[in-house]
Amino acid sequence: MKKTVGKATAPEVAGLLLEYGRRSALAGGNPYRAKAYLRAAESLAAQTEPLERLIKEDRLREIPGVGDAIADIITKLARTGTHPSLEKMRAEIPEGVLDMLSIPGLRPEKVIKIYKELGVATLGELEAAAKEDRIKDVKGLGAALQRKILQGLAIRRDSPGARHVHRAEELIANATDSLKRSGLAITKIVPAGDFRRGSELVFNLALVGQTASLEDGPKRLTAGEFTIYLTDAKRFGINLLLATGSEQHLRELEEVAKAKGLQLTKDGLLKGGKIIASKTEEEIYKALGLQYIAPELREGRGEIERARAKKLPKLVEAKDLHGILHAHTDASDGVATLQDMADAVRSRGYQYFGVTDHSKTAYYAGGLSVEEIDWQHAEIDRLNKGYGGKFRIFKASSPTSCRTAHSITRTRSCAASTSSSQVFTASSAWTARNRRSASCARCAIPS
């Protein structure tokens, strides 16, 4: 159905742009362009301002990932409900094939090969083909991909609509800026939901906004993929608590309240119809006879009993961290240079940084040869010398096998025991608990 400006919502147009990006990925060509469409679609879906306003005020480029070309595509999609290039791509690939791109680890070129070689055009057909061992025999696919597909299908079923926490953080930051421009007179905005609880996968995007006053009490609004809880200062704590969750944690809190003759509502903690706590989360937990429970612990896994006994654990915070380990530079599959990453780590006050670029066996990720590793290590030595002992870059590698790890460390002369050239690997076969102090690095790696 065709849309006109003023009727097409941001989520609707985002859905079309997502399809545009997926079909572009399947069509081949520049993979970065297809990824740009997908990223812009996700940002658009999370917009809290009306799309009509953004288009009329020529502000589409304020959306993360949206430049001139994508802004033009969004405008055409909003005005007509389609795009000439999109219609052309629709004629080439069935809609069901696009769903295969939602399988973790299944790349566009593999999806096309499965479609063309096996005639598989839906997720159901894909699962059947994998279970019947038909994928492993296709040249260029194999048994490993077949196993990955079955695992990916299981992940997709268990985690629908989830996004990684780092991407959720970007969307929340953009939505926060958007809300500040919304004209709702919001004085304070705090992230809530899965993100505030520190979940690695975020299923719900939520914000709590405080305004000077609300005539009809707290409100819950939907803007794109976001749920926005509007409240006043008097009820900010209770709304932040309810918006943060988890559901199980809140159910257990309600049981605690009931046992004390209290009632947990969106207006606050009530006793005989009178609010006794609502401004802050701390005062609500205190009124329930509980130690304050940090958001990261609110999962309904025994934290209520621990809080009642005042035995909650002390959480590790950002200030407790002294360095960053296992990071990839643009020498393999990262996006920033060695020096840029070291500068970023230093700027955050950390004391060390461990570089773990892929080794040569990870050719699919631009793995480094032994010669390239030697060059990188020389560059690390140069940078470390300039830090004067106030910061250190540790040398490392992410080998895909013990044999590779052994071959890398074999070229070093007891590197791990020298103060100026420390080496470690990030191989799953050699973990920190197996590392031997005051010994050559390769001694800790089984052949």
Image: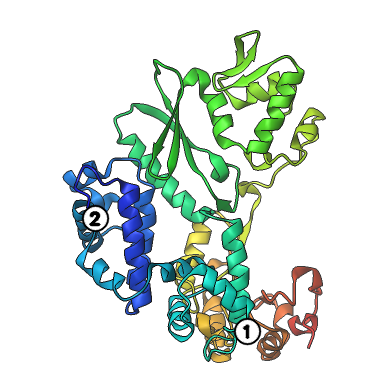
Where disc 2 sits, the SS reads: loop
Residue 360 vertical position relative to residue 212 in the rendered view, above or below: below
In the displayed structure, does residue 19 sit left or right of residue 391?
A: left
Give x and y (percent) for residue 384. Answer: 56, 72
- Colour style of the rendered protein structure: rainbow
Residue 381 can be seen in this image:
yes
Residue sitting at x 72%, y 84%: 402
Question: Image point 38% across, 75% down: which residue?
Answer: 26
Is 380 placed left or right of 411 in the picture?
left
Q: Which residue is mark 1?
A: 143
Residue topped by disc 2: 81
Task: Determine whether 378 is above or below 286 in the image.
Answer: below
- In x, y percent, where is residue 65? 33, 58
When the figure is inspected, residue 131 is found, relative to residue 281, above or below; the finding is below
- Give the distance between the C-alpha atoms of the residues marked 2 and 1, in whole angstroms: 41 Å
Q: Quadrant of the C terminus?
A: bottom right
Mark 2 Cα within 10 Å, few/some/many (few <14, many 20+)? some
